[in-house]
């Protein structure tokens, strides 16, 4: 089939002949006829197969055959990157040079005033990035009410890389009656379903299966540690005598770092990504096309639209997480019937990505083992491996797991409980009395307080089996009891010193009998503890509630069994309320 058989108008046929095209590519031969008929289209073809001409030529012919009297926008092409927008703009200029149709490219990163001035003059075809387009639409500079054709180029990236919301905003402003075209280098099944949601009875054109790659590309794989990739890349560029190369980085920071390392190694390199200004990106791309820059480092989004016919090598510095992205990356080379080479680096942590790529392509990528930083997957190179590391390097990169584990002392290996502190007997208590491991969380201060506590009375439970919180509650109750007993003592008695808790006996020795609790009140008046029956907790005649003593300003002279008793003693419910200062008792 030739372009003449596609029934193109003479102006387009002459422009195609001037460009040197005689035979349409498979995507062009299958896509142009249904588009000329006004059908919606979903096109999928490999990178470098002529997708731009597949929608540019029929759009130019449809608009030229049906002129209108207005200067509104009649066709809109949405692209994910500025570079791709410029590339599509160049194609429309080349194919439509013999027509009177006007086109405009708008994108962010530059001043909007020249773009606004061009829009006011009237535009037939608008090529735009979603961000700047939504901005100008919000300001009222873009009117899409008369739109006839809508094209979403690189649909997989537009929908998969975060532009879905911007695309939906644009589609919401479009008229309902329009022709929709979707073109993409890769089209996974889920993205295809999402994209077809706003296509009306589309014609699906798939030149190659989604998992196919360009057969003319010589692919190779290098297993290497992540830190050694920066050494292997300049080594291969110099060893393989690379004419020009496109290096793919996963992150923007990584692209800058790779370019800096290559420049330090004497290899001219430049980086392009979304954080670069438009001027810097255009300068880097033009320098690479002109041969002034030997290596161009780019991210996946920024690389969309890079069209270089004589690109010799593509390096995957980091394997892509999405297997279909690998197809697009290596498709940057071997264009226009030329041959190309695709080299991929795989670190041990990227083996999962490699498995997905090989599963999608249904074939293994040849592995190159003969290089200074060879790694067979995650297994370190050994002397019998043909691609072992140079002497002195393999030892430095052996994983620590290969070292013999240090032998622990027998006591530590068995997980024995730590020994007793000084001043305590070394013999462990019987097994049933040993504290649980949970008690190890008690602080050292609490343990010291417990060692200085006197012997438990008959009604108390031993402290060894209690938790830290239970011990603290017990100490609070004892402190409240001591305070109550001290308050109830006669005032004529001399002031007793504080409890002996502040005076510790020397470690390793037991306190002398004379040094124990000087004149501590007898325990006979203490309220029985937890194991005493509930009836024994009723207040005695002269005993006072320690809780009330702690919180009241004045010790109560009389206690009541219930609230009714209290109200009866104070005059009943009709008695006047007396303030605390006016009370006599």
Image (cartoon, grey):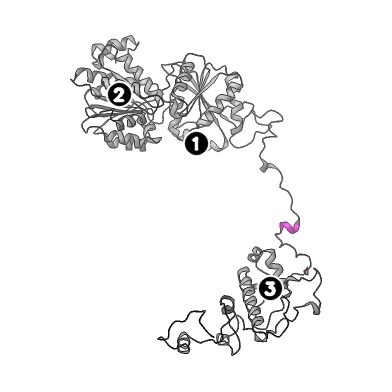
Q: Is residue 145 above or below residue 429?
A: above
Upstream in sequence: badge 3 or badge 2: 2
Q: The residue tagged with tag 1: helix, strand or loop?
A: helix
What mark, if any, has residue 433 been given in the picture?
3
Q: Give coordinates of residue 73: x percent, y percent.
A: 25, 24
The answer for how far apart the CA atoms under marks 2 and 1 are is 38 Å
Is-magenta flag for residue 417?
Answer: yes
The label nearer to you, 3 versus 1, is 3
Q: Residue at x 45, y 34 (%)?
A: 323
Q: Give coordinates of residue 462: x percent, y percent.
A: 67, 77
Q: Is residue 575 above or below residue 267?
A: below
Q: Is residue 152 above or below residue 468?
A: above
Q: Give coordinates of residue 189: x percent, y percent.
A: 36, 36
Q: The residue tagged with tag 2: helix, strand or loop?
A: strand
Check disc 2 and report the residue beneath it.
126
Is 224 on the left-hand or right-hand side of 322?
A: right
Residues drawn in magenta: 410-435
Check disc 1 and report the residue beneath it.
353
Single out the residue that lies furthest toward the left.
69
- Front one among 304 and 411: 304
Residue 544: image quadrant is: bottom right
Is 315 on the left-hand or right-hand side of 231?
A: left
Residue 200: image quadrant is: top left
The label nearer to you, 3 versus 2, is 2
The label nearer to you, 2 versus 1, is 2
Upstream in sequence: badge 3 or badge 1: 1
Query: Is the C terminus in the top left, top right, bottom left or bottom right quadrant?
Result: bottom right
The answer for how far apart the CA atoms under marks 3 and 1 are is 57 Å
- Front one among 231 and 540: 540
Q: The residue tagged with tag 3: helix, strand or loop?
A: helix
């Amino acid at each position: 089939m030739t372009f003449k058989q596609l029934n193109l108008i003479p102006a387009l046929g002459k422009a195609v002949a001037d460009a040197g095209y005689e035979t349409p590519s498979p995507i062009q031969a299958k896509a142009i006829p249904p588009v000329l008929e006004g059908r919606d289209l979903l096109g999928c073809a490999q990178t470098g197969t002529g997708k731009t001409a597949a929608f540019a030529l029929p759009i130019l012919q449809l608009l030229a055959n049906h002129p209108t009297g207005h200067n509104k926008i009649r066709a809109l092409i949405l692209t994910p990157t500025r570079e791709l927008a410029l590339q599509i703009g160049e194609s429309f200029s080349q194919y439509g040079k013999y027509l009177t149709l006007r086109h405009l490219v708008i994108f962010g990163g530059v001043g909007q005033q020249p773009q606004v001035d061009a829009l006011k003059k009237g535009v037939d075809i608008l090529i735009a990035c979603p961000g700047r387009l939504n901005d100008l639409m919000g300001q009222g500079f873009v009117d899409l009410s008369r739109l006839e054709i809508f094209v979403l180029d690189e649909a997989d990236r537009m929908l998969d890389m975060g532009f879905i919301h911007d695309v939906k905003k644009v589609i919401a402003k479009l008229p309902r009656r329009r022709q929709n075209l979707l073109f993409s280098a890769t089209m996974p099944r889920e993205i295809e379903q999402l994209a077809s949601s706003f296509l009306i009875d589309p014609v699906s054109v798939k030149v190659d299966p989604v998992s196919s790659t360009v057969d003319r590309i010589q692919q190779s794989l290098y297993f290497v540690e992540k830190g050694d990739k920066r050494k292997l890349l300049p080594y291969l560029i110099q060893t393989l005598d690379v004419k020009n190369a496109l290096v793919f980085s996963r992150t923007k920071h990584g692209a800058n770092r790779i370019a800096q390392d290559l420049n330090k190694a004497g290899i001219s390199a430049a980086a392009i990504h979304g954080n670069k200004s438009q001027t810097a990106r255009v300068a880097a791309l033009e320098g690479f096309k002109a041969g002034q820059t030997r290596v161009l480092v780019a991210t996946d989004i920024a690389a969309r639209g890079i069209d270089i016919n004589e690109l010799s090598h593509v390096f995957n510095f980091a394997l892509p997480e999405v297997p279909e992205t690998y197809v697009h990356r290596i498709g940057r080379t071997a264009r226009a019937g030329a041959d190309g080479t695709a080299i991929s680096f795989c670190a041990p942590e990227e083996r999962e990505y490699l498995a997905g790529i090989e599963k999608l392509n249904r074939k293994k990528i040849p592995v190159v083992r003969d290089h200074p930083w060879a790694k067979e997957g995650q297994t370190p190179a050994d002397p019998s491996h043909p691609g072992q590391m140079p002497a002195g390097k393999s030892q430095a990169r052996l994983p620590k797991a290969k070292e013999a584990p240090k032998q622990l002392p027998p006591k530590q290996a068995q997980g024995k409980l730590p020994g007793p502190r000084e001043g305590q007997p070394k013999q462990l208590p019987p097994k049933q009395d040993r504290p649980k491991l949970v008690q190890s969380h008690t602080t050292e201060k609490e343990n010291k307080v417990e060692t200085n506590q006197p012997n438990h009375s008959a009604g108390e439970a031993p402290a060894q089996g209690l938790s830290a919180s239970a011990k603290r509650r017990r100490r609070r109750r004892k402190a409240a009891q001591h305070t109550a007993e001290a308050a109830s003592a006669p005032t004529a008695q001399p002031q007793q010193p504080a409890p002996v808790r502040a005076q510790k006996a020397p470690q390793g020795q037991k306190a002398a009998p004379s040094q124990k609790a000087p004149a501590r009140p007898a325990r006979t008046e203490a309220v029985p503890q937890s194991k005493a029956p509930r009836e024994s907790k009723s207040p005695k005649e002269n005993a006072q509630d320690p809780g009330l003593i702690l919180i009241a300003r004045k010790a109560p002279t009389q206690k009541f069994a219930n609230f009714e008793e209290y109200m009866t003693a104070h005059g009943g419910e009709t008695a006047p309320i007396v303030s605390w200062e006016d009370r006599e008792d």
